[in-house]
Image (cartoon, helix red, strand yellow):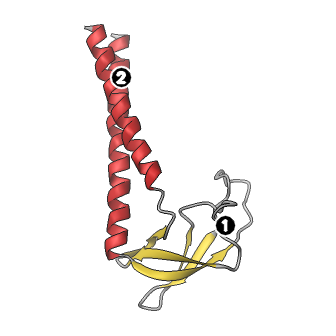
Amino acid sequence: MGGFAVVVFGGLGGVIAYLAGVVGLRDLRRLRRVGVSVQALVRERVPGPEDRALPPRPLLQFETEDGQVVEVFSPVPSTPRHPLPDGGYVPVRYDPADPRQVVVEGRERRPVEYAFMALGVLMVLIAITLGLAVL
């Protein structure tokens, strides 16, 4: 019974990972299609002791079409290759229905979503293989 539970939970985990990748890609496509492009001000923040994200992500501040000022955490970290310098501006797309949903243009992280999908498929295939071996 223990081996069967591992197979079931492994397969379920694979399905969840695959669906996470699919949803991520769908959201990226939706933001590319309906998102409004603006320049966001990058604001560095001092990480507190409760911050666990490494590297810490800066804040992005921008104004929506209706004049609302929105401040969100960057969906991507600052890297040496693609820095997000304090006081600089980066192009972002935001969802007009929910301005807190943003993507930094040119840094959409599609490979991460595809990796989730591939990992999910791999986990399901391993679960099926183990399930056939248990029978």
Locate residue 84: give its quadrant.
bottom right
Q: Which residue is drawn at 70% across and 60% down?
A: 80
Kind of residue indicated by mark 1: Pro
Locate residue 71: give its quadrant.
bottom right
Q: Which residue is drawn at 37% across and 76% down?
A: 35
Q: In this figure, which residue is indicated by the disc labeled 1?
A: 83
Q: In the image, 39: left or right of 52?
A: left
Distance (Cα) linking label 1 and label 2: 39 Å
Q: How many marks?
A: 2
Q: Is residue 104 above or below residue 68?
A: above
Q: Which residue is drawn at 34% across and 20% down?
A: 7
Q: In this figure, which residue is indicated by the disc labeled 2?
A: 126
Q: In this view, does 124 lie above or below 35?
A: above
From the viewer's side, name the closer residue of 1 and 118.
118
Residue 97 at x, y percent in the picture = 34, 76
From the viewer's side, name the closer residue of 122 and 67.
122
Image quarter where the C terminus lies is top left
Q: Residue at x 74, y 65 (%)?
A: 46
